Amino acid sequence: MTKQRKAVSLISGGLDSMLATKVIQEQGVHVEGINFYTGFCVEGHTHAIRKKDKEKQKKNSSLWVAEQLGIKLHIIDISEEYKDIVLNPKHGYGQNLNPCLDCKIDMVSRAWQWCQDNDFDFVITGEVVGQRPKSQRKETMPIIARESQIEDRLVRPLCAQHLTETLPEREGWIKRDELYDFHGRNRKPQFALAKKLGIEEWSQPAGGCCFLTDASYSKKLQDLWDARGERRYEVDDIMLLKVGRHIRPAKNFKLIVSREEGENNFMRGYRPQFTYLYPTSHGGPLTLIDGTPTEEDLELAARIVARFSQGRDAEKVTLEVVREHNQPAQVVHVKPMPAEEIPEEWYIH
């Protein structure tokens, strides 16, 4: 009796990894999914916080994909180890602070190690030649296979016919003529294949959910490093870069100004770690202050926050400033700063 072959598929939550997995399942291979949690890929997270996004689904896309495909999913937290990839990418960054090539090498390497530990035969990814300018080019694909040390046990079902034959194909575990020749950024072939395979719904568009590919998010992260004078971050930093208006009037402090009720509620949990302030005479945003503000800085901060309150046109707005959690609040009365007096360069976006 022929041994049933087993593969693990990198599940991002997007359509490509869903299709790649299904294509190999259809060939009789037992497939399980693996998803690596980096801290930067939480697309349901901001939808869950912001009230205006409350209609959006708050599903974990990879779990949802695994459920649709009927496969077991292994979620592995690599957020600590991943810091080195973000801070020191051997192959550099993409357009923003996305270390895509190093990231893919690392994840394939981890998936291959998982295969060896669990008696699985090969790894599947949803990569397509020419779809990503940094990590999915014909010349970078062999680098991923080589540097992850998986060599020819890495199968990319959606573009396999553009690539060298892999060991699973040579050994007859899977049929090469049932793999595909997709290339480039055109998504029509994927949509047609989804229809053919009976997949009617999928999650986010191509590009995944990684915040590091986002220009605005990358600017905020770079600003954080510049202000601290060193390249480091914690998971709390990652979360707070996703919410609020970020305004930096000076190198020594930054305001994180809540934009609406959902963010207000979320940011309350961070009050013990920051100096914070909020209007009391009018409705307005909770604001966290990251850094070491002086008394003058706090007055400036109060005037900026007052501008975002319902008292923006009032003569005076009263706010409470709390320098240390559980310490008495300092009450201040300020004239809101007119919007045109807040320099555009203070906004980090």
Image: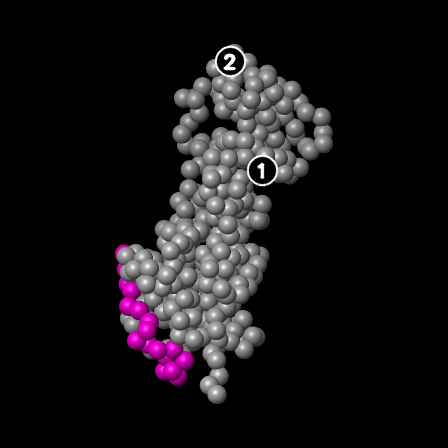
Q: Which mark is residue 266?
A: 1
The 10 Å Cα crowd at callout 1, few under 14, some 14 to 19, many 20 or more, is some
* Residue 84 against residue 314 in the figure, above or below: below
Residue at 69% from the left image edge and 33% from the top image edge: 325
Q: In this image, 184 relative to 294: left or right? A: left
Residue at 65% from the left image edge and 28% from the top image edge: 322
Where does the image place residue 328, in percent across and percent down from the top left?
71, 26
Q: Nearer the viewer, residue 181 or 67?
A: 67
| Residue type (three-letter) at the residue carrying disc 2 | Ala
| Residue type (three-letter) at the residue carrying disc 1 | Phe
- Say which element carries label 2: loop
Where does the image place residue 157, in percent across and percent down from the top left?
36, 69
* For marks 2 and 1 on the same chain, the one whose residue lies earlier in the sequence: 1
Residue at 51% from the left image edge and 76% from the top image edge: 120
According to the image, label 2 marks what residue? 314
Residue 179 drawn in magenta = yes
Instruction: Estimate the spatial distance between the alpha carbons at disc 2 and disc 1, rounded to whole Å.
Output: 28 Å
Where does the image place residue 253, in percent across and percent down from the top left?
54, 34
Where does the image place residue 62, in percent across and percent down from the top left?
49, 57
The magenta segment is 169-186
